[in-house]
Image (cartoon, helix red, strand yellow):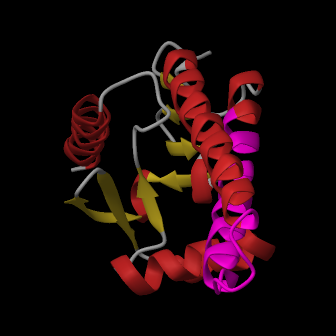
Amino acid sequence: MDKDEIVFKISKIKAVSLTLIAVGLLIVLIWFLVRVLALPLAFNRTFLLICCSSLIGTFILASISGIRKLFDSKQRVVINNEGIKIDTGPNKGQLISWDEITGFKIRKDFLLIFIKNPNKLFDEAYGLQKFSLKMNNISHKTPVSLTATWLDCSFETLVKTIIQEFCNRQQHSN
């Protein structure tokens, strides 16, 4: 690790907490599904079965994602002289160089990072990641967004660090 690097890793406490919440909700939904199946046939339960089944699928995926984050030490955000290396979320595997960044915006608990050439990110991505980046670009006008939900820092610390490093790079380049 470079001395000029700032690394925000996945918080094990947050990962365990969020995974336990997902597993708990999954158990409640399975219990509810069993109760729905026990309803009399005269009751139209199709809607409840579809909703419950789709929610069970969602919470299974959330649980798997949480468990993977617990054991994957490579998921993190690295801020260094080159830029911001994102190894978590929909931007996983992306290096956003300081020269590429045009601005920032905070929307709820997301730091939106505006870049000069979003098409470059689309070309490098494939599959579900590419779809996710395009959806981000449509809804937020940028494909790059960060949150501290899983990170071992607060959202405020993440934002302050990134903006401060960006300003430092701007001063040094002038």
Spot occupied by residue 33 in the image (x, y as percentages of width and height) = 70, 59
Q: Is residue 20 above or below residue 114?
A: above
- Residue at 42% from the left image edge and 75% from the top image edge: 116
- Residue at 21% from the left image edge and 50% from the top image edge: 174
- Comparing 2 with 6, the one in front is 6
| Magenta stretch bounds | 37-66
Spot occupied by residue 27 in the image (x, y as percentages of width and height) = 67, 40
Residue 105 included in the magenta stretch of the image: no
Spot occupied by residue 119 in the image (x, y as percentages of width and height) = 58, 83
In the figure, residue 108 lies in which quadrant?
Answer: bottom left
Q: Main secondary structure of the magenta part?
A: helix
In the figure, residue 123 lies in which quadrant?
Answer: bottom right
Residue 42 included in the magenta stretch of the image: yes
Q: Is residue 68 above or below residue 37?
A: above
Is 126 situated left or right of 113 in this image?
right
- Residue at 52% from the left image edge and 24% from the top image edge: 17
- Residue at 56% from the left image edge and 82% from the top image edge: 134
In the figure, residue 115 lies in which quadrant?
Answer: bottom left
- Comparing 118 with 71, the one in front is 71
Is 127 situated left or right of 147 in this image?
right
- Comparing 51 with 142, the one in front is 51
Residue 97 appears anywhere in the view: yes
